[in-house]
Image: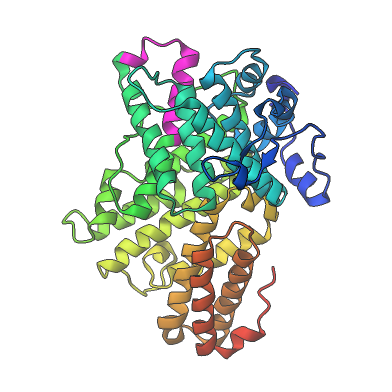
Amino acid sequence: MSSRSRRNIVRGTVIRACREGSARPRSGSTGPELVSSSSASNGHVVYKDSTRLSAEFFSNLLQDYTTIVLPFLPIVSENEFASAIAEKKPDQTGSAFVKILGAITLNMRCSWLGEEETDRNQINLLYTQALQQRGALMPDHQITVRTLVIPLFAATCILDINPNSDMGVYYLREAITGIQILGVDDPSRAVRLDASDRAQQERLYWVLFIHERLLSITSRRRPTLSALPNLLQPDPTIPEGVLKGFNQIILLFKTIDDTFMTHWIDRQAPTLTMAWIEEKQSQLSGINDDWEDQIKELSQMQQIDLLVTRDWLRTLVWQVALSRFFLTSDGRPSRHFMDITFPALISRRLRMMLTATPRQAVEIHGTGILHKVFEIVSMLGDLLELVLHATCDDRTIIDHLDDYSFLYTFLNSMSKFDPVEQTILNTRFMTVQAQYPALSTLTGTG
């Protein structure tokens, strides 16, 4: 299917295929052939014969790439991927480029269709060989979109399996450094590029901007990339729905501005006032006047990512307000974001969203979205243990416990839920259950 015809794909087709178990069968083409680690000089599993990575193997990934990768990593068009596959004698960078695109596609397909060990081996081998083929970064190394996609997508694959991987962060930092060297945020350099190259570099920049903002939140370190003055520009090589959806993601992450990061890192900053809390919560609650109406036009995979991310960001602002004792319990609906029980309200909405969304539309996002859900559930657990018993009646407590049970069960059913976070969640659940024996009788079903 061409890029042009794919723009008219009916929203929800992919999700319906998941629901009905009618996903495309695996290609009969041969994937990477593996040999045991005892046969490898470096002690790792290696390719026995890299020529078995045929053009057919990668061509059979193109439709999955466009359907499940491009909406969230809209850098390389389907046509560019196809052209790279078709190159008869690619150089080392060209070969590495194809393999890293194959790796990221398989990585997201594992989440979409259900993880299989064979796919995981292929993913690890593909991104490892892509990094090996691009070689050491020597003085004559050329920094281009292709050479930056390799460490970025390698980092994405690595961090999806191990969110605490030092090398995953290292490769992400390499890509961030590269985009700074390209000077995408420098108008005097950007005008020298043709429209297509400039649009692609800006898409890469925004993807890295978002990844760095997420890393900055978890590490409490200031980001280095500033927001560009414009959103993604129309590009005939990228489906319109992809650009619209990703622009909405950009709008969300632009709210994590320099002042936000100052207050997140330093809770005693003099600029942290109740007025700032109210302004940021108001900004996140609406984004713009018709934000929720706009995202209804997107796929379910795009919608759940946006909605969960928005509510997760609102809980971050709530945490900042909590640290300065700005929260109240006045119960006014217009100021519910300043209420001590706000995460319980977010948890109720989160449950409703997850109940209405197919599991595959959530799990395709991997550990990133699950971490956000985990943090929201953890805050609900804190409230149940420390606050709600003193502020809510018995019926309301049962409702919150039922939400907690649902979200607990949901996370534990996800194949990519981080084991460390799972241990923390299970320990907290037992603590809450000891305080509220009724929790053991709740099913937490949709």
* One can see residue 176 in this view: yes
Q: Can residue 234 be seen in this view?
A: no
- Residue in the picture at 29% in, 38% down: 224
Indicate whether residue 325 is drawn in magenta.
no
Q: Which colour scheme is used?
A: rainbow
Residue plotted at (71% across, 38% down): 11
Front-lying residue, 309 or 433? 433
The picture quadrant where one finds residue 135 is top left
Q: Residue at x 43, y 20 (%)?
A: 144
Residue 189 image position (x, y, % from top left): 32, 15
The quarter of the rendered structure image containing the N terminus is top right
- Image quarter (top left, top right, bottom left or bottom right) of the C terminus: bottom right
Lateral position of residue 300 relative to residue 25, left or right: left
On the image, the x and y values in percent for residue 162 come to 50, 53
Region in magenta: 189-207
Q: Main secondary structure of the magenta part?
A: helix
The total of numbered circles placed on residues is: 0
**Quarter of the rendering containing residue 5:** top right
The image shows residue 8, relative to residue 394, as above or below, that is above
Q: In this view, does 233 lie above or below 440?
A: above
228 lies left or right of 31: left
